Image (tube, helix red, strand yellow):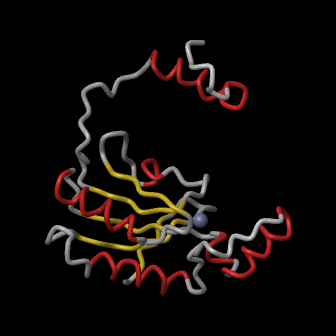
Amino acid sequence: MSVSSSFPRAAFLDVISANFHFVENFQNSELTGTARKGLAIVTCMDSRISPLAVVGMQAGDAKILRNAGARVTDDVLRTLVLASYLLGVNRVLVMPHTDCRMAIADEASIHATIKQQFGVDTSSLEFRTVSNQREALAEDVTRIRSYQLLQKGVSVAGAIYNVSTGKLEPVDC
Ligand SMILES: [Zn+2]
């Protein structure tokens, strides 16, 4: 395997191995970095979510922004500004999900869990947990809609993804 010697091979063996097969069947050479369907999805890092598959899209169609809890942070806004002016994005879907740890536990209890299990104090970080997922979604959608630097005319919506059924529930924001 032609990977550099400082690469932790054992930990990534399946990853590198799978990529060899991926390359054999690779058909996306002609794609550009522009979102062909004009869509950006802001969603959670939860491994049960395959954002493109959820909305019937493929590589090349949409921009995917992910973090814990699908929160609209400064970095998400920064990325959406670039996407809206330079990468073809004209609509944004904020998509948190059911059974999200960020909406079930509160800030203090997550810090306490990490402290208790690993002995590390993470209290200098804000994990941005939410106590009311729908309210937080509405706030996040409003934050994008009212962001002055975003390209005018971008359509912004919120929907909750159900990890048990695969269904998207549009939310009034
Ligand atoms: Zn989540």
Q: How many marks?
A: 0
Is residue 135 found left or right of 99 in the rendered image? left
Name the residue rendered at 49%, 71% in the picture. Answer: 160
For residue 32, above or below residue 120: above
Q: Position of residue 82 (x, y in %)?
A: 24, 57
Name the residue rendered at 26%, 41% in the picture. Answer: 33
Name the residue rendered at 25%, 50% in the picture. Answer: 37
Name the residue rendered at 39%, 64% in the picture. Answer: 75
Q: Position of residue 146 (x, y in %)?
A: 25, 82
Comparing 168 with 67, the one in front is 67
Comparing 151 with 115, the one in front is 115
Ligand 1, seen in the image, is in the quarter at bottom right
For residue 158, above or below residue 22: below
Comparing 97 with 78, the one in front is 78
Q: Position of residue 46 (x, y in %)?
A: 59, 58
Is residue 168 found left or right of 34 in the rendered image? right
The quadrant of the image that shows the N terminus is top right
Is residue 169 found left or right of 151 in the rendered image? right
